Image: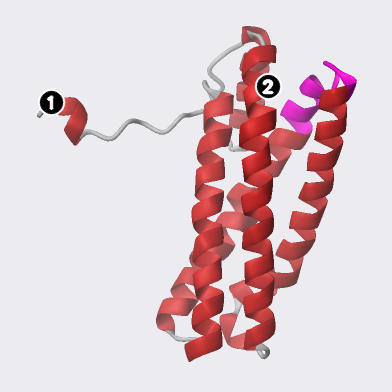
Amino acid sequence: MSNDDLIPPAAPDTSDPLGMLRACHDRILRNAETLERIGERVASEGVDAEVRKAAANVHRYFAKAGKHHHEDEEVDLFPVLARQSLKLADLIHELRQDHERLDALWEAIAPELEKPSSISDAAGFKARAEAMAAAYREHVTRENEELLELARHILGPDDLKRIGNAMAERRGLPTRYF
């Protein structure tokens, strides 16, 4: 057994903006899965302390990290890529529409996640949770398989530095490159 087996690899940071976006996608999917489980639990057993804790974690994640993630893409990544080709511009237009749909799904469920005791329609909450999770699964798959794969081949070192610096600034972290 080597030391590499005992120490998990470090998560990508802003020095690897595309890696960081992929890692964020993984966290989005984990939180979406938790959201689905919360919906199932609320529908079958109601709201208890475990649901309240899980809901607070999911709310915190999507309210802050999810917002930063959309800004990373919309403000920093999409504009650079959209200039490359009409085909890429069309893909980015579709992904922006996905973001609008995801934001609307979030706005519909956020108040209930913030205060789970306010959930009055358990079946409706479950349906909203399932819709949001499904929309994120579809969106993340498309971004990972199409957008980020293309970005890996298109973006040069200067583009990646600019995007990484913007991501760091958004999070109040020191920038690594000038």
Q: Nearer the viewer, mark 1 or mark 2?
A: 2
Horizontal and vertical percent position of residue 47 = 50, 86
From the viewer's perspective, is 82 left or right of 14? right
Please state the horizontal and vertical placement of residue 152, each as a whole percent of the image: 62, 18
Q: How many marks?
A: 2
Q: Is residue 61 magenta?
A: no
**Can residue 120 be seen in the rendering of this structure?**
yes
- Residue at 71%, 35% in the rendered image: 73
Placement of the N terminus among the 4 image quadrants: top left
Tell me if residue 82 comes above or below residue 51 in the rendering. Answer: above
Main SS of the magenta part reads helix
| The magenta segment | 75-86
Q: Which mark is residue 2?
A: 1
Sequence-first disc among 1 and 2: 1
Q: Nearer the viewer, residue 53 or 177?
A: 53
Q: Is residue 107 above or below residue 166?
A: below
Q: Residue at x 46, y 29 (%)?
A: 12
Badge 2 element = helix
Q: Position of residue 101 (x, y in %)?
A: 80, 56
Q: Which mark is residue 133?
A: none
87 displayed left or right of 166: right
In which quarter of the view is residue 146 placed?
A: top right
Dot 1: element: loop
* Three-letter code, disc 1: Ser
Q: Nearer the viewer, residue 169 or 36?
A: 36
Question: Marks 2 and 1: in contact by CB < 8 Å?
Answer: no
Q: Which residue is mark 2?
A: 150
What amino acid type should be assigned to the residue bearing mark 2?
Leu
Please rate how many residues cluster around mark 1, counting C-alpha atoms within 10 Å: few if below 14, some from 14 to 19, many from 20: few
> Magenta span has 81?
yes
Q: Is residue 146 above or below residue 139?
A: above
